[in-house]
Image (cartoon, helix red, strand yellow):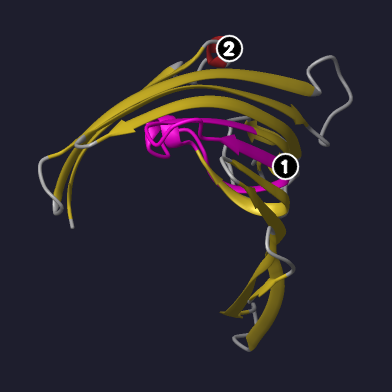
Amino acid sequence: PSMTINENWSGHAQIDYDIQKDNTGADVNGAEVAKIWTEGQYDKFNVKLGRFGSFSDASHGLVFDTEVTGAEFTYAPTEAWKVKATAGRTSVLTKKDDNGKVINKALVYGTKDEDAATYWAVEANYANGKWDAGLGYHNVLATHTYQKTAEDNSSYHIIDLGVGYAFDKNVKLTGDYAWGVSQNKYDNAANSAYSIQLNYK
């Protein structure tokens, strides 16, 4: 659902309804408000406040594509250039065994029932005709609830960049790279990622 508040502001929400089986085989139905936010547009300046979906435009979603509770500010001084700043809270996943012991501290976005994390990012994006490109910086500070040690807080610093070329309205090629400058603190974590995609329609 969405509504118009005034000439500059609008309100939006997303309601998720899940149908699943419990351990007895019975249907368990649940509805929740997954997103609810207001959005304001003032000439070249856009602002979102509340719980909304955020996307790492610089790397075509390679680093971030999930909900944030906070604020997002976008400024487009020209049709080609756009600068975006996002700050708020999101979620990380800490995988545990049956006894509650943590067996993996990998960073995973989008979970609703695990540890919270503070997230902020800045991006600069360019799009002109067939070409687009972007550069971004993302910071995630995860506050873990499973232990009370010096490692309670895990900080991640991620730099991403990407480029895309649209051959026509149906075919586009994108290449993206991300470097997690602090990801190598865990033995099983890679400190870089890349994606090459050829998209049709």
In this picture, residue 151 sits left or right of residue 134: right
Q: Is residue 79 above or below residue 154?
A: below
Q: Is residue 200 above or below residue 143?
A: below
State the image quarter where residue 70 is shown. Answer: top right
Q: Is residue 95 above or below residue 164?
A: below
Tag 1 secondary structure: strand
Picture coordinates of residue 27, whole percent (x, y): 62, 88
Nearer the observer, 122 or 186:
122
In this picture, residue 183 sits left or right of residue 145: left
How far apart marks 1 and 2 lie (CA) works out to 25 Å
Picture coordinates of residue 54, whole percent (x, y): 57, 45
Q: Give the magenta-colored segment's residue range.
A: 56-85
Q: Residues within 10 Å of mark 1 (few under 14, many from 20)?
A: many
Q: Residues within 10 Å of mark 2 (few under 14, many from 20)?
A: some
Picture coordinates of residue 195, whole percent (x, y): 29, 31
Residue sitting at x 66%, y 67%:
12
Residue sitting at x 78%, y 22%:
153
Picture coordinates of residue 96, whole percent (x, y): 67, 42
Tag 2 secondary structure: loop
Magenta-colored stretch includes residue 61: yes
Task: Classify the position of the N terminus by image quarter.
Answer: bottom right
Task: Classify the position of the C terminus by image quarter.
Answer: bottom left
Nearer the observer, 10 or 149:
10
Residue sitting at x 46%, y 16%:
191
Task: Using the image, tell me which numbered label, if any, was put on residue 5.
Answer: none
Q: Is residue 56 above or below residue 185?
A: below
Give the residue number, with chain letter if any, for mark 1: 71
Q: Which residue appears farthest toward the bottom when viewing the image?
A: 26
> Is residue 175 visible from the viewing direction of this image?
no
State the image quarter where residue 47 is shown. Answer: top right
Give the residue number, with chain letter if any, for mark 2: 182
